[in-house]
Image: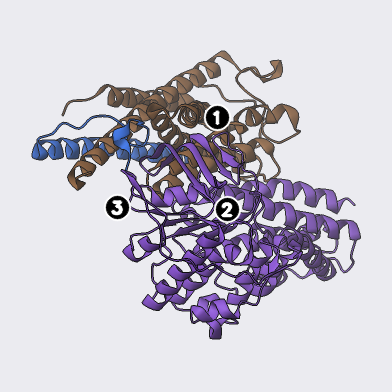
Chain colours: A blue, B brown, C purple
Amino acid sequence: MDDKTYLSIAYLGMIFGLAIWTWTVVSRSRNMEQRLEAMEQSLKVKSTDADSVAAIDSSEQS
Amino acid sequence: MRVKANEAILASGFLGLMITLFLAFNWAPSVNINAFESPESQRIFYWHVPAAWAAFIAFAVLFVGSALWFFKRSSIGWKMHIAGSEAGLACGLMAVWSGCVWGAAEWGTPWDWEDWRLNTFGLLTLLALFLVLGRQSQPDGVETRDTFSTFGLYGFVLVPLTYVATRIWVIRHPGPVIAGEEGSSISSEMGLVLLIGAISFTTLIIGHILTSMEITKFEQRLERLQKELDGE
Amino acid sequence: MADPVLQLDNVTVRRGMGVVLDNFSLTVNQGECILLEGENGVGKSTIIETAARLLPMESGSVRHHGAVVCDAEGRRIKPPKSFGLTLQKNCLIPSQTVQQRLNNVLALSNRTLDLTGIIESYKIANRRNDKIAHLSGGQQRKVAVISGLLPGMVCEDSRLILLDEPDTGLDDDSVDCLIEHIHMLRNLGHAIVIASHDSRLRQCATRLYNFDASSIQQPNHNATWQVKSDTAQHSFLMTKIGWQLNFDTLVSLQTNWLAALLIMGTLLSIADPLTLSDNELILMGFALAPAFGMGLVGDSVFKILQEQRAIDWWRAQRNNVPNSYFESLLSGILITTIAMQIFIQSVDYQVVIIGGLITLTTSFAVRFLQLSTVRLARSNAVFIRLLTPILILPWGIIVDYCAKL
């Protein structure tokens, strides 16, 4: 295999890997947003962005 | 479907990478044919260096996020920790993989177990892999966040060590390209392609970090809703 | 007024998804027995585990007998007196016998005692020489409960006894026996904290604490436990260095030694050392690979302590939990001697010592990584060994160095 073919295959592999990763992240984000909206509509509530683990208010105590 | 800002950033980063790739193959000059075993493989450098650069940005985000969580219990800090580890893993793997491709062609071996630069960077990538896989194996909670943030803080010690490794130890890996010694200077065409690559990778990594932080935000909102359904 | 044995001062503890104890304070005096009640998740076990120094705190401090044993600054100081501890999980080492386990507890209190009467009362006297792994769930729980009560049974001066749901899995007779023992130990002057949902244990308590309110009561039981133990300066060294646990369980043989022998066998299967006599670097690598592999398997004692989370019980009792450092060093020396004889046909004492040190430092590094993840809910499933390949680099440098000796 000459140098250029070797390099092209390596580059294509990496571009392909990066594309799959980017697509996975974007579709995960979109799916989760749709799921969240569907749940909020069916429950008729609007969830807050608060982080349960980080919050320190006393209502967090179990 | 509406395209969000982070998705547009991701797309422009990806486009920039394609341009880098085109320029690397068709425009950037060849290196001195006598100085390299495999002169064409040197073109991997236009991918390898920006990937490593982007990985360092991601590891910096990981470090800042870990510190913010560990010392301030900041929710944003934890989101940065997650985003930094995922982006660091992806870019770290790109840098390691492209380095192996070049090493196999130039040195005759994809990896050198006695090279400090390779090994410390490899460890950083393994650390990111550990943080991503390990976190997925644990329920979310303060114990999980504290433990992984501690490792995020440990890991950042390796970043300066990795950068200076080529200067301190006599190793196979070439010296630093950015802020390197005078002898490491490169031609202007090469520098331009490298710069476009670095900007593209940086744009892509920023897009990934923003998207990942958004996913974590959605996960936390879902968790809240689940708790409400549980009646807590 | 009786002296305080346990004090939790303004303790804030986060656990799981939120703050479980928020500026919580509790004092338990000599001769007091507090029963913690309340629904699941209210924080009963968190109080017990915080008192036992097992949980990091955001604020406050914990004192045993007036001395700080841990605080929010991260200090962990050995308690001035041994204390009894039964956690929700049994925290037993399944490869130990019942007698060996109870001997460990006695050694921590520097006492000896004929245990026959006690284990007979829980109907496990016939099992005293059986391995814990061979016992039923209920019998294992009895061993865990006796371990928690024993420091109070062998010491006349006041001790702290922490029992987290001790009645779980016990038959009715054993619960009656447990109640009797708690009464007698409380009357002797020990301070006892119990977390339980079992209403039968309410009769033992001088204070019922259910987080919303607490009520004081006077138990109707005056018998006192008669201490019959003798003081004995146990040499705890053999347990501390893991020697005893290694001998009891042979865990080092089945893990570290097996890995080292497999590496040696694999290397022998691919190359005849006599044909490689010119290549000193390769031969030195072969000679030092078993020692390295032995270390990469990790600390054998740590491995057995992870079963049933026995490590939590030991972490509560001691700052330095048992380890196999000494055994690792010896094993590394021995396996390197054997490997050198096989691959190089000569033994250099410097390389042999370096082999021992390779096993010791490698297993220490692996143990450090594992200890860093011990707080996690699923510490065995955390991929921590992904970080160990970095150890190949120093090993390679050492092989280079040894080849030039």
* Quarter residue B80 falls in: top left
Near-viewer residue (C189 or C77): C189
Residue receiving disc 3: C39
Identify the amino acid type marked 3: Glu
Q: Is residue B27 visible?
A: no
* Quarter residue C72 falls in: top right
Q: Position of residue C129 (x, y in %)?
A: 60, 82
Is residue C162 depicted above or below C14 in this figure? below
Identify the amino acid type marked 1: Phe
Residue at the extreme top? B188
Q: Is residue B176 visible?
A: yes
Is residue B151 depicted above or below C168 in this figure? above
Under tag 3, what secondary structure? loop
Residue receiving disc 2: C316
Query: How far apart in space, not on screen, are marks 1 and 3 (Cα)?
Result: 61 Å
Near-viewer residue (C55 or C197): C197
Q: Is residue C188 left or right of residue C16?
A: right
Q: Residues within 10 Å of mark 3 (few under 14, many from 20)?
A: few
Using the image, tell me which numbered label, if any, was put on residue B45.
1
Q: Position of residue C230 (x, y in %)?
A: 71, 69
**Residues tagged by mark 1 and mark 3 found on one chain of the structure:** no
Query: How far apart in space, not on screen, are marks 1 and 2 (Cα)?
Result: 53 Å
